[in-house]
Image: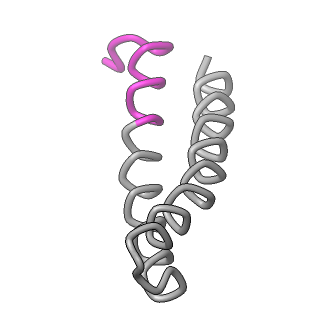
Amino acid sequence: MLGVAVGLALVCTMTLAALLGFLVPFVLIKLNVDQAAGSAPIITSIKDISGLLIYFVLVSFFMGKLI
């Protein structure tokens, strides 16, 4: 079950990363902000935090209590 949780977390995180890779520069262009300077820190921060949250939620769902 741990492998299923890790695999699903990987798929969800990569899908989120692709979505953020498109949306963040698009929004920054619409706000007339230089997208090259702002995209990398914003995308990395959101992806790292949400990736860990996705992983922990899926592991707790599939593995139950780890005691």
- Residue in the image at 58% along x and 34% along y: 9
Task: Report x, y in % for residue 43.
Answer: 47, 65
Task: Report x, y in % for residue 64.
Answer: 39, 11
- Residue in the image at 61% along x and 16% along y: 1
Which quadrant of the figure has residue 26? bottom right
- Residue in the image at 64% along x and 40% along y: 10
Instruction: Give yes or no for residue 59 being in the magenta stretch.
Output: yes
Instruction: Give yes or no for residue 42 being in the magenta stretch.
Output: no
Task: Report x, y in % for residue 20.
Answer: 54, 54
Camera-nearest residue between 28 and 43: 28
Numbered-mark total = 0
Camera-nearest residue between 28 and 7: 28
- Residue in the image at 33% along x and 14% along y: 65
Camera-nearest residue between 9 and 41: 41
Which quadrant of the figure has residue 4? top right
Specify the principal SS of the magenta part: helix
